Amino acid sequence: MNLLNLTVLAATVSAYGADAITGRVLNASSAALTDARVWLKSRPDVADSTGADGRFSLTLNPTALTPFSGGVSGLPTFRFNAEGLVVSLQRQQNICLELRNAQGRMAATLFKGRLEKGENSIPLGREVLKLLSGAYYLAFTGEQTAGSLPIRGSFRMAKSAAEGDTLIVLRMGHEIRKLPLADLSARDVGDVSLKLRTYRKDTAVAVKALRRIEVFVPSDYRELYLLPVLYLIHGAGDNEVYWREKGHLLDSLNTFSDREKVQPMIIVTPSAGGAPGVGAYGKTGDPFVPDLAVDIRKYVESHYKADTSRWARGISGLSAGAAQTWMLTLFYPELWGWSRPMSGGLGRSTGYTPEKLKADVASKVVDVAVLNQMKLFKEYSNPSDLALMDTQTTIKIIESLGIKIATDYTTRTSGGHAPVFWNEVFRKYAPLLFKE
């Protein structure tokens, strides 16, 4: 279809009344409910955050479209009125009308079939009325004409609709609840009880040779929507079971004091060794680095409810896994919103030199601008960590190249280079992940 240079025509909404769906969220602790969120599945714009007492109210405002019209000489003309869309044709023909979003994707089909010469009235169905506010294009194809008419406006479902919906209730750290609604009429749904979320090991699978992964998901995984993914890498001499068996991953997720603050997520622990060049400098020096960036990532994103946006991916690793985390962060920054290496920097034993890194930054093989878009890039070590000096040396070079990185050398100052330190670091940053 050809995009025509037409004037943007406004479609606004008018609200009548303020009926609401109300209720109260409860949980085991009966406190700190201000972060509970309640919304309608088909209308995420109809939402409310609860107060300290857990009460919520979702306002149901009936709406109507303000009429407008537009057209181009020689083409069909269109106008919206309170009942729907009116199409004026110069002759009888088959026609297809769609609403498309700003990216050109179809948001709703208005009509597909044969229309008569003159004015034709097309009612707006539920598919159109439940669309979010925003800019849309009215795209049309006919037997002789094709084009797009830009429209900016709001399309809303009125509260009088007889069709049902689902009330979604979620509090950080607690399992999601879905309450079917027979219709969208005003009511009090009463008390909605929530329980603390736990995590479980879902599966272990060989993605490719030498690359087994363990995957951990929330207890309410089936009820949740797309989830962020954290990739946790072990150290030298271990494998994909390290974080579960030595790092006490499930214990950290299911019992530590700040677990109520943890964003629901998928956690993947891959086998990162088994080949020469573990932690080697460069984009492909260590075979594991492209294996995780490509094969493992694509497997997870095609087999799980994984959010595939950059900001929904995190990478973290300890010791030799920290070196791998550095490589994945520096050479694949477009993949990550969050990076947290622990007890490890860039060492000459892996083929790294400051000169190589400076050259890669100068040639944009390491893209500083993309790196600095990350939500957080942070290194952890402690005064009794055998990797402290290596880490501090790396940080100085990194900062001199304009790369933004934070450090934390205070977590368990007597933690050393050991699981007790890395376990506590994980507990410290888990409640902060995937939050603005």
Image: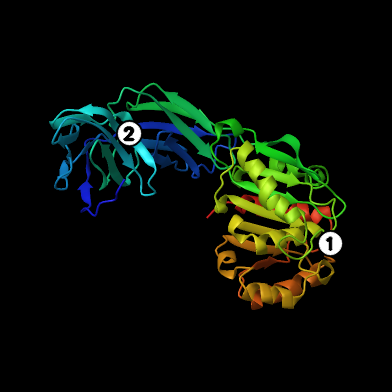
Identify residue type, mark 1.
Gly
Report the mark closest to the observer, 1 or 2.
2
Identify residue type, mark 2.
Thr
Residue 387 x, y percent position in the rendering: 82, 66
- What residue did someone put label 1 on? 416
From this view, report whether residue 215 is shown above or below residue 436: above
Q: Residue at point 49% right, 44% down?
A: 34
Residue 265 x, y percent position in the rendering: 62, 43
Residue 269 x, y percent position in the rendering: 74, 45
Check disc 1: other Cα within 10 Å, few if <14, some if 14-19, many if 20+: some
> Mark 2 and mark 1 in contact (Cβ < 8 Å)?
no
Residue 107 x, y percent position in the rendering: 36, 39
- Left or right, 88 with respect to 59, comes to left
What secondary structure is marked by label 1?
A: loop
- Left or right, 210 with respect to 164, comes to right
Please say which color scheme the image uses: rainbow
- What residue did someone put label 2 on? 109
Task: Name the quadrant containing residue 48.
Answer: top left
Number of labels in the image equals 2
Residue 430 appears anywhere in the view: yes
From this view, report whether residue 419 is shown above or below residue 204: below
Residue 130 appears anywhere in the view: no
